[in-house]
């Protein structure tokens, strides 16, 4: 049920004038009366957001740690949502941060209790965060694993029995299976290959039920940047095909940790060709009764596809990075073009097979959609253009990834179009109060911005230590730093570095250590906050992690977080007049500020930052030392 605007409207005032008065009353009077600190930076931010709502503008709202950014954007957003009759969209960096935003005792929960707002808040998670019943059934046929039995035991009765739709309820989120590893989850979660429209289990699917649920939100819909970008890119296509968009219409968008939006936009626009997926798809259509001509074409496509990947491996540029560049040899392009031609022939034969009803309808539609996307992606690869290509291992499968170099034109047309206000909120959006880097990377020409500092006195509560080390000695120093018993977050610049550290640990090590990926991440973070283990190692949690008090007293940064030398950033560097100053340094400086920002979250927090620095990193201290909250001391 839709709730009223949380303040009375006056016929002599506009909504925005009344909103302005309400914001003043809340932050100057009511919150201090309820025990909250009066923070000028927070109040300034709330008024700036009110102005951006009025003008439907893009606002870069940079506010230091401890400002109270969440309350500053939530109150205006809720009022504006109720005024417009459309929910506010809050987009977070990832699914883990969504869970933190809505956790018991978090800002939304407290705000609801303090002012009896009766908030209607619903989560819209990325599709890969949901169990896919089709893939789950397939995994059960291939594997005999304990995690599959655990998932089966957790399924609602209506999944396997006939119940009226009134008895269905949301289920199947990744966070519901905390002990399942990321690798196990990737065997059973939603995969883009699935044809949801033709799926006979659609009405019992947890993802479908969740979508029907969050689309009815009246106040707040909370999603990840990845899901927001997928919604933006697919909205027109889904409407054209008679499907509902992934997200409902919204009144405004708040991008929490908005500096990460560019990467989400790029990920949403990528096209993938996996070696094994084609084999799985063709297996489903090679059934009894299929015409010999169709079977012959399928076999030719499989042979060409396998030959393409053999040549692709030979053409891959050796690198320690996860994303490996590709040399487009004449032989590789020739095989790619021939594969596309054979698939075009195969799709014509599928038309005849559909008329004969030999292949099950779901499997045939899935194959047709898969090959349509396959040929589109492969044509991008073999043609000359500004697409970026690389090979990486995803879900333990070698994957060719094709991505457009720039997303700015599409973002300008479909998102920053002036129809709804867009608020970027983060402690790090600028480099020394210059917002050029983020604005240029997103193609934003017209924007408002402000930057307010943290209210914390860092010199009293934080120490930053620098450790001069040889690169090969860093892992040993990380291990030594565990000995103090502090609750410790170890930040690596890549998954590969984290995995290498994991392998370097003594087999009989005495510390309780959790590694990102071994279990569902939001559950791991919750248990870390509760002190159930001492050390959390991550390559992903540089931003947004909120662990106040004794939950976190030491942060170790193993390497300066420069961007990788992979095809994506190499393309950025190629089109930059000064790659070091325009690409590498801003990325590193923003990320290191984010990592340090995990430590001090409230006025009662304290702790240590440890920077492990090799000779090359020490030489450029003038480039990272200037952004530290306090000067670094030698350890």
Image (cartoon, helix red, strand yellow):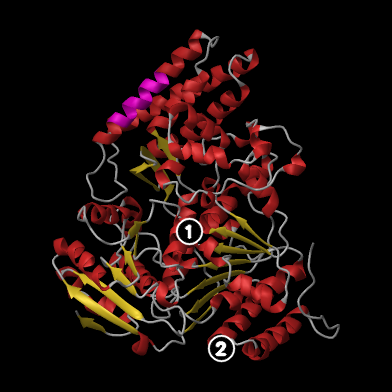
Mark 2: few/some/many CA within 10 Å (<14, 14-19, 20+): few
Q: How many marks?
A: 2
Which sits in the foreground, 355 or 164?
A: 164
- Residue at point 58% right, 67% down? 104
Which sits in the foreground, 522 or 153?
A: 153
Among the two numbered marks 2 and 1 on one chain, the one whose residue lies closer to the N terminus: 2
Which quadrant of the figure has residue 514? bottom left
Q: Is residue 529 left or right of residue 208?
A: left
Note whether 344 is above or below 3 in the view shown: above
Which quadrant of the figure has residue 585? bottom left
Residue 538 appears at what percent x and percent y? Answer: 35, 60
Is the Cβ of the residue at disc 2 closer than 8 Å to that at disc 1? no
* Residue 522: numbered disc: 1
* Residue 37: numbered disc: 2
Task: Kindly report the secondary structure that dominates the magenta region of the rendered protein.
Answer: helix
- Residue at point 35% right, 90% down? 460
Q: Secondary structure at mark 1?
A: helix
Q: Secondary structure at mark 2?
A: loop
Magenta region = 300-310
């Amino acid at each position: 049920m839709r709730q009223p605007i949380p303040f009375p409207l006056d016929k002599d005032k506009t909504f925005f004038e009344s909103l302005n008065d309400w914001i003043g009353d809340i932050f100057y009077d009511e919150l201090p009366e309820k025990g909250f600190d009066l923070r000028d930076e927070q109040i300034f931010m709330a008024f700036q957001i009110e102005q951006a709502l009025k003008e439907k503008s893009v606002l870069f709202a940079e506010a230091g740690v401890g400002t109270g950014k969440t309350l500053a954007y939530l109150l205006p957003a809720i009022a504006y949502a109720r005024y417009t009759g459309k929910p506010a969209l809050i987009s977070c960096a990832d699914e883990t941060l969504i869970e933190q935003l809505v956790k018991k005792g978090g800002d939304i929960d407290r705000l609801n209790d303090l002012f009896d707002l009766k908030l209607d808040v619903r989560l819209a998670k990325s599709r890969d965060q949901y169990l896919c019943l089709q893939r789950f059934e397939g995994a059960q046929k291939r594997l005999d694993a304990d995690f599959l039995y655990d998932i089966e035991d957790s399924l609602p009765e209506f999944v396997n029995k006939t119940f009226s739709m009134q008895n269905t309820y949301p289920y199947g989120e990744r966070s519901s299976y905390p002990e399942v590893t990321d690798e196990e989850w990737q065997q059973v979660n939603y995969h883009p290959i699935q044809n949801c429209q033709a799926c006979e289990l659609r009405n019992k699917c947890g993802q479908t039920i969740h979508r029907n649920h969050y689309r009815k939100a009246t106040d707040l819909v909370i999603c990840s940047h990845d899901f927001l970008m997928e919604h933006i890119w697919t909205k027109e296509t889904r409407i054209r095909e008679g499907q509902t968009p992934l997200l409902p219409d919204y009144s405004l968008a708040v991008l929490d940790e908005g500096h990460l939006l560019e990467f989400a936009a790029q990920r949403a626009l990528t096209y993938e060709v996996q070696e094994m997926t084609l084999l799985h798809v063709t297996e489903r259509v090679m059934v009894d009764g299929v015409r010999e001509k169709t079977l012959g074409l399928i076999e030719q496509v499989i042979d060409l596809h396998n030959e393409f990947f053999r040549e692709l491996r030979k053409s891959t540029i050796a690198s320690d990075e996860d994303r490996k560049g590709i040399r487009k040899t004449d032989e590789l392009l020739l095989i790619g073009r021939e594969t596309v031609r054979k698939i075009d022939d195969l799709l014509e034969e599928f038309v005849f097979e559909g008329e004969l009803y030999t292949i099950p309808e779901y499997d045939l539609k899935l194959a047709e959609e898969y090959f349509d996307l396959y040929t589109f992606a492969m044509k991008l690869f073999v043609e000359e253009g500004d697409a970026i290509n690389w090979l990486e291992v995803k879900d333990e499968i070698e994957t060719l990834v094709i991505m457009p170099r720039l997303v700015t034109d599409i973002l300008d047309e479909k998102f920053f179009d002036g129809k709804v206000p867009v608020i970027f909120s983060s402690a790090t959006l600028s480099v020394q109060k210059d917002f050029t880097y983020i604005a240029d990377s997103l193609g934003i020409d017209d924007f408002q911005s402000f930057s307010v500092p943290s209210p914390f006195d860092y010199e009293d509560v934080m120490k930053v230590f620098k450790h001069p080390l040889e690169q090969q000695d860093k892992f040993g120093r990380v291990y030594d730093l565990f000995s103090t018993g502090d609750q410790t977050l170890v930040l690596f610049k890549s998954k590969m570095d984290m995995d290498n550290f994991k392998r370097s640990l003594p087999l009989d090590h005495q510390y309780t250590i959790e590694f990102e990926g071994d279990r569902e991440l939001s559950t791991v973070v919750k248990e870390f906050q509760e002190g159930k283990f001492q050390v959390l190692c991550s390559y992903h949690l540089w931003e947004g992690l909120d662990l106040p008090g004794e939950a976190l007293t030491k942060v170790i940064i193993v390497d300066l977080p420069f961007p990788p030398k992979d095809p994506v950033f190499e393309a950025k560097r190629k089109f930059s007049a000064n790659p070091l100053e325009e690409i590498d340094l801003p990325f590193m400086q923003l990320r290191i500020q984010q990592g340090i920002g995990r430590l001090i979250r409230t006025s009662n927090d304290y702790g240590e930052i440890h920077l492990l620095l090799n000779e090359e990193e020490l030489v450029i201290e003038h480039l990272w030392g200037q952004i530290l909250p306090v000067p670094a001391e030698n350890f």
